[in-house]
Amino acid sequence: MTDNTLEALNQKLDRLIEAVSRLSPPLAPEPHFAEADCFVWQAETGTLLPVPRVNRVDITLIRGVDRVRDILLDNTRRFAAGLPANNALLWGSRGMGKSSLVKAAHAEINRSQPDGEGRLKLVEIHREDVESLPKLMLLLREAPYRFILFCDDLSFDHDDTSYKSLKAALEGGVEGRPDNVILYATSNRRHLLPRDMIENERSTAINPSEAVEEKVSLSDRFGLWLGFHKCSQDEYLEMIEGYARYHDLPIEAERLRAEALEWATTRGSRSGRVAWQFIQDLAGRLGQTLKV
């Protein structure tokens, strides 16, 4: 082989290597967990996006769910201390503070922790990215932190098989859930699947009981089921009064109650979300800003 032929071959190999490099996806950068206490998982790029300011409320403002609040706080505190703790499914009525409680519990535990490795990290994964859970688990497994993996409004529809990925990632895989990761999910459905989907399986399957078990066993992977139910009028007004005190809104108690009840009547419901929306409207009318 002549020198010219060898040089031409080397040039072709260089061009081929360059072309293949352009086709290959870039390596995801290593996450810098010290940057923030909260991250959002970007499944397409395999990266964790730090969130410098988390949208949450103080845990003292979450009313009407005292029992489940205490249970979740205790479970989170044990997990932060390296003790056994359960995955938690917060299910029930919309607007009653399920996602707010997860974020507030994370902040409350970290408030008592010094800066450094003892602080919990909150990682949000979107429902449509559930199939990428094994990849995320692998990324978190070796990190020197403990993580609350948070999925808001988790549910599955007809012909959606991604719930199987979640089952395996939680408890069913060979490696199992990493010791430094716990999953908190919120849903309006206790079994995460629509009732008509479960009923259809029961009526059409060759072995109905086995088909239903396959579907509902997903929620069994959560050791804690924390139910959130519609609040009473007194609980709704307690939320309103708590918000008004916290944000120092200058309004008489009787007027506050009357306007709050009228707001709930026009909305046709009472919940923590409705209470917060009323407070935002009231603060705007009073020309007040709300505390961050």
Image: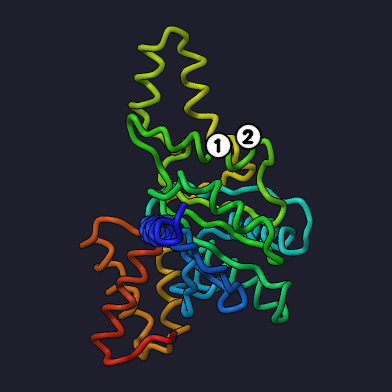
Q: Are marks 1 and 2 in contact (CB under 8 Å)?
A: yes
Q: Which mark is residue 23?
A: none
Say which label, 1 or 2, has the lower sequence index.
Answer: 1
Residue 147 relative to residue 198: left or right: right
- The secondary element bearing badge 2 is classed as helix
Q: Residue furthest left?
A: 266
Report x, y in % for residue 255.
30, 80
Report x, y in % for residue 71.
65, 55
Residue receiving disc 1: 167
Report x, y in % for residue 206.
43, 7
User: Quick check: 201 above or below 24?
Assistant: above
Q: Is residue 55 visible?
A: yes
Q: Quadrant of residue 14?
A: bottom left
Residue receiving disc 2: 172
Q: Residue at x 45, y 56 (%)?
A: 2
Q: In the rendered structure, which amino acid carries the disc numbered 1?
A: Lys
Q: Residue at x 52, y 57 (%)?
A: 150
Viewer-closest of 100 and 175: 175
Mark 1 vs mark 2, CA separation in Å: 6 Å
Q: In the rendered structure, which amino acid carries the disc numbered 2?
A: Gly
Q: Residue at x 46, y 83 (%)?
A: 245
User: Quick check: 258 above or below 206?
Assistant: below
Dot 2 crowding, Cα within 10 Å, few <14, some 14–19, many 20+: some
Residue 82 relative to residue 32: left or right: right
Give the mark count: 2
Q: Quadrant of residue 158?
A: top left
Q: Is residue 25 visible?
A: no
